[in-house]
């Protein structure tokens, strides 16, 4: 049989009602044979037949269908063995297909006799789409030109753009308007788009959300566009952020791009540590690395760039070396703030190699000696994470467990000058093992309006460390206004603080704490959870 086939179905004598024929249906990858060769022998008839077994014939890899036969002709048995022979048989297959249709093997009545009696119109729509039955318009999709059938009635009923294309001012003068070429949408996301039109099934994933949004906006399907936006708002996380960012960049979805970029900048430590970052294009990586809002230390940023450079070298079939890292990083190299690296990291990772020139190394090392000296090559402005300050309101810590299960922890406070609140700290589990804490927190202003919030799972190690929780968006706090931090913690007992101070100073800012009636766990000014705040000074 032909190599690289991904599925096969043999139809025996009972199906054919004859002893002379045995048909085998095989699905091939398009790289083996050009799909256009097969359009001359009733491709759609064959497609209708096969799709009763293979519901996803038109998938992202651009599959098409060929009919292979083993049949007795004048006492001779012809058995397909090679791709070349297959191509030679195409005219023969045309006759075979006609024979099969004549025996009603591929007649629609034999596929499913009762599908039209279904009370559910959505199921009937799905059947017609999946089986490509009675299609009156065809789309040629993506770079491979994969053919996908549809029905004008459904398209026109769901999209004003399709209405204009087929029956309005956008319709061409030629009567041959049944084939629509769409090179900018690949088969799989377009099929998901069609399924939404036919059945109302969105089928949104991180991999296709931007493609679906693009199709929804292109054809004015506002309901699907809204679902795509909601998907990003609700399910976007550090694991899929880079994938979505890259898609938004490809399709020039500026609003999506801004939304995803903001999340990446806020959750930079998690995003930059993930493998997904290595698949970004150089422009997207440069936008991330160049931002002063990137919430990560410079050595983590450097490591992410080096991992990306290694992957890029492999993509370009280049040797993995410092000189090639410098080549592929190009302008990104100068967005890394080398003067902000810890001295030991620079001496260990950069000085021995050739990522930087000798002149650039001397420039950075000179700034280590004279911190306020400007760099001739690199940005020396502190990123927002490097400007973060921390305040601890307790002087000591309980070793015994603190029960958070009775409700929310809360503490009220005022500040003596305007600041930017970035997050807060919590105590971890007091049990000697790795345990999860589910943390949900928000800050209320004096009108009880939520001004920032976060939900996060923390992995604690049973030690007495404090754990940082950064808000999804920072908030500007005005001086002498009462704010309340409210945090619920789901999980095992935790450590807790004691000997809390009413007023604590940090970097010339006075924090004055007071009891909040929203506290349900026993957290007060003097003891409990919520040991600290994370903030930055206004500039």
Image (cartoon, rainbow, N blue to C red):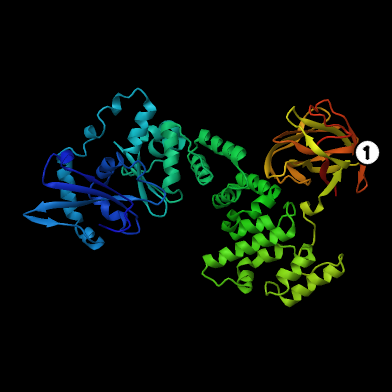
Q: Secondary structure at mark 1?
A: strand
Is residue 287 or residue 113 the one in the foreground?
113
Residue 483 screen position, x and y as percent: 84, 33
Drawn side of residue 210 relative to residue 533, left or right:
left
Q: Is residue 513 visible?
A: yes
Drawn side of residue 288 relative to residue 176, left or right:
right
Is 145 drawn above or below residue 343 in the view shown?
above
Q: Which quadrant of the figure has residue 524? A: top right
Drawn side of residue 187 relative to residue 408, left or right:
left
Residue 410 screen position, x and y as percent: 81, 31
Q: Which quadrant of the figure has residue 535? A: top right
Furthest-left residue in view? 74
Is 144 drawn above or below residue 196 in the view shown?
below
Furthest-top residue in view? 119
Q: Residue at x 20, y 58 (%)?
A: 80
- Figure disc tally: 1
Q: Residue at x 39, y 28 (%)?
A: 122
Residue 24 screen position, x and y as percent: 22, 49
Residue 54 screen position, x and y as percent: 32, 42
Q: Residues within 10 Å of mark 1 (few under 14, many from 20)?
A: some
Is residue 335 or residue 505 the one in the foreground?
505
Is residue 41 or residue 22 the one in the foreground?
22
Q: Residue at x 72, y 61 (%)?
A: 299
Q: Which quadrant of the figure has residue 55? A: top left
Q: Quadrant of the N terminus?
A: bottom left
Q: Is residue 478 visible?
A: no
Q: Which residue is mark 1?
A: 503
Furthest-bottom residue in view? 358
């Amino acid at each position: 049989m032909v190599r690289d086939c991904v599925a096969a179905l043999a139809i025996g004598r009972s199906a054919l009602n004859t002893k002379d024929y045995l048909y085998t249906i095989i699905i091939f990858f398009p790289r083996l044979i050009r799909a256009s060769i097969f359009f001359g022998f009733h491709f759609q008839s064959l497609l209708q037949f096969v799709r009763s077994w293979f519901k996803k014939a038109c998938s992202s890899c651009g599959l098409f269908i060929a009919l292979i036969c083993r049949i007795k002709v004048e006492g001779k048995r012809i058995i397909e063995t090679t791709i070349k022979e297959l191509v030679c048989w195409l005219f023969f297959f045309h006759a075979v297909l006609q024979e099969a249709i004549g025996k009603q093997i591929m007649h629609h009545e034999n596929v499913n006799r009762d599908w039209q009696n279904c009370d559910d119109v959505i199921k009937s729509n799905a059947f017609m789409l999946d089986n490509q039955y009675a299609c009156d318009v065809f789309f040629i999709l993506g770079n491979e030109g994969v053919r996908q059938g549809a029905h004008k009635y459904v398209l026109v009923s769901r999209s004003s753009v399709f209405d204009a294309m087929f029956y309005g001012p956008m319709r061409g003068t030629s009567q041959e308007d049944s084939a629509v070429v769409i090179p900018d949408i690949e088969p799989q996301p377009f099929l998901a788009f069609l399924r939404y039109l036919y059945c109302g099934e969105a089928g949104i994933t991180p991999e296709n959300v931007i493609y679906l949004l693009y199709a929804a906006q292109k054809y004015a399907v506002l309901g699907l566009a809204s679902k795509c936006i909601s998907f990003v708002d609700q399910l976007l996380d550090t694991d899929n952020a880079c994938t979505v960012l890259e898609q938004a960049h490809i399709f020039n979805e500026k609003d999506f791009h801004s939304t995803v970029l903001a999340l990446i900048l806020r959750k930079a430590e998690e995003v930059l540590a993930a493998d997904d970052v290595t698949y970004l294009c150089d422009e997207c990586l440069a936008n991330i690395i160049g931002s002063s809002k990137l919430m990560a230390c410079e050595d983590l940023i450097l490591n992410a760039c080096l991992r990306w450079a290694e992957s890029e070298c492999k993509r370009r079939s280049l040797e993995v070396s410092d000189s090639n890292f410098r080549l592929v990083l190009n302008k990104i190299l100068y967005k890394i703030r080398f003067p902000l690296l810890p001295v030991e990291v620079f001496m260990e990772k950069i000085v021995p190699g050739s990522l930087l020139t000798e002149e650039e190394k001397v420039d950075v090392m000179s700034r280590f000696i004279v911190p306020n000296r400007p760099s001739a090559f690199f940005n020396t402005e502190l990123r927002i994470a490097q400007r973060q300050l921390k305040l601890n309101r307790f002087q000591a810590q309980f070793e015994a467990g603190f029960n958070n299960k009775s409700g929310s922890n809360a503490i009220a406070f005022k500040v003596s000058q305007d600041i930017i609140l970035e997050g807060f700290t919590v105590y971890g589990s007091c049990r000697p093992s790795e345990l999860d804490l589910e943390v949900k927190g928000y800050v209320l202003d004096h009108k009880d309006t939520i001004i920032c919030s976060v939900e996060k799972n923390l992995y604690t190690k049973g030690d007495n460390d404090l754990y940082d929780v950064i808000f999804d968006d920072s908030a500007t706090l005005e001086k002498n206004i009462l704010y309340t931090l409210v945090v619920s913690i789901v999980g095992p007992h935790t450590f807790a603080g004691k000997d809390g101070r009413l007023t604590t100073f940090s970097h010339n800012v006075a924090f004055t704490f007071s009891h909040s009636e929203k506290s349900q766990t026993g957290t007060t000014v003097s003891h409990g959870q919520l040991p600290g705040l994370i903030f930055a000074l206004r500039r």
